[in-house]
Image (tube, helix red, strand yellow):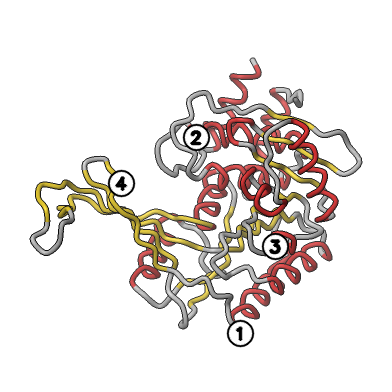
């Protein structure tokens, strides 16, 4: 475990302020309808939910952008919206939060990715997904790449946040990584199953246990399994670092030419793991951009992920909460 002094923590927290982090990936809108069930529909044997409240939240890569904002950074989401009502709601949320919107492109050929959850009497009744998983057209890919290329020197880091909804295509992944490395820009990845091995030559590759199991075709249970998986990913991807998240098992850090490190989980009472991965990649990237070494950054990210697991719902980490809790633990 890193021995981070109070002075070092204070220095890192100060350097978080104003860091510009581009978040490239699948922007989503999370929609919630809350209500009560008092009767069964006469049209079919299904409950009638009388909606009492509805609200909307950022999901997917947009939640990562929100985490960056809450950590005192400047988040620049880069992705697509559809020409629909969900896209309008998403744009309204962007305006309310003050997140930069110039990297968001309206794609006339696809819907805004939206996940609608219907909850009645505290019971999740159904989820309705509206999305396209097709890869972006060549024209939209060019618009995204051109925006990144034009602004690359302004970025302190880039996060590639993949949910396999079609934004991060193999060609776009390769071009963005090549561009970032050319300009020596920090680039981190939160992958999904598709395109997994396209993310070569990045600063940090952060899969979770299930993603690693799926692509490697193995179960990751024992310490030996973890070591084998991490080393294989490090070698296959030629990444500078691989951070394998293990849920209640914490994290395993693999760095080129160095000894594997383990970080036990910081979640004392895990109530909801939703959004924890978004918080981990956001905190990790911000810390590295602020000058933390990979072990310090992983420690802070691990702590942040643990804190958000203790809260119900997808809630971003607040910078004061994170650093205050870490400082308290160090004492």
Residue 139 bears which disc, if any? 1
On the image, the x and y values in percent for residue 269 come to 48, 25
Dot placed on the residue nearer the N-terminal end, 1 or 3: 1
Residue occupying image coordinates x 61% and y 46%: 210
Q: Quadrant of the N terminus?
A: top right
Report the side of 131 relative to 277 (left or right).
left
From the viewer's perspective, is the residue at label 1 or at label 4 nearer? 4
Q: Residues within 10 Å of mark 2 (few under 14, many from 20)?
A: many
Q: Residues within 10 Å of mark 4 (few under 14, many from 20)?
A: few
Give the residue at mark 2: 309
**Is label 4 in contact with label 3 (beta carbons under 8 Å)?**
no
Q: Residues within 10 Å of mark 3 (few under 14, many from 20)?
A: few
Give the residue at mark 4: 124
Residue 154 bears which disc, if any? 3
On the image, the x and y values in percent for residue 154 come to 70, 62
Dot placed on the residue nearer the N-terminal end, 1 or 4: 4
Image quadrant where residue 46 sits: bottom left
CA separation in Å, label 1 and label 4: 39 Å
Q: Nearer the viewer, residue 257 or 125?
A: 125
From the viewer's perspective, is the residue at label 1 or at label 3 nearer? 1
Q: Residue furthest right?
A: 257
Secondary structure, mark 3, is helix
């Amino acid at each position: 475990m890193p021995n981070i002094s109070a002075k070092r923590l204070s220095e890192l927290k100060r350097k978080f302020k104003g860091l510009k982090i581009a978040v490239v990936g699948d922007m989503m809108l999370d929609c919630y309808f809350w209500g009560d069930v008092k009767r069964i529909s006469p049209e079919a044997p299904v409950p009638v939910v009388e909606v009492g409240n509805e609200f909307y939240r950022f999901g997917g890569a947009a939640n990562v952008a929100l985490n960056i904002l809450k950590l005192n950074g400047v988040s620049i989401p880069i992705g697509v919206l559809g020409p629909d009502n969900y896209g309008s709601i998403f744009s309204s949320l962007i305006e309310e939060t003050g997140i930069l919107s110039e990297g968001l492109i309206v794609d006339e050929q696809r819907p805004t990715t939206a996940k609608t959850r219907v909850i009645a009497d505290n019971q999740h009744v159904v989820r309705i997904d509206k999305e396209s998983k097709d890869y972006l057209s060549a024209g939209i890919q060019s618009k995204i790449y051109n925006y990144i290329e034009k602004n690359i020197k302004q970025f302190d880091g880039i996060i590639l946040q993949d949910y396999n909804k079609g934004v991060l295509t193999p060609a776009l992944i390769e071009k963005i990584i090549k561009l970032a490395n050319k300009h020596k820009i920090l680039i981190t990845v939160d992958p999904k199953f598709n395109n997994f091995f396209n993310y070569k030559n990045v600063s940090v590759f952060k899969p979770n246990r299930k993603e690693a199991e799926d692509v490697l075709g193995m179960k990751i249970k024992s310490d030996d399994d973890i070591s084998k998986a991490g080393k294989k990913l490090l070698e296959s991807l030629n990444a500078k670092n691989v951070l394998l998240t293990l849920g209640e098992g914490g994290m395993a850090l693999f760095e080129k030419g160095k000894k594997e490190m383990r970080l036990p989980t910081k979640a004392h009472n895990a109530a909801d793991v939703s959004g924890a991965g978004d918080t981990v990649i956001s905190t990790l990237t911000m810390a590295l951009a602020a000058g933390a070494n990979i072990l310090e950054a992983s420690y802070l990210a691990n702590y942040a992920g643990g804190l958000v697991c203790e809260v119900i719902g997808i809630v971003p980490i607040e910078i004061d909460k994170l650093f205050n809790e870490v400082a308290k633990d160090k004492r």
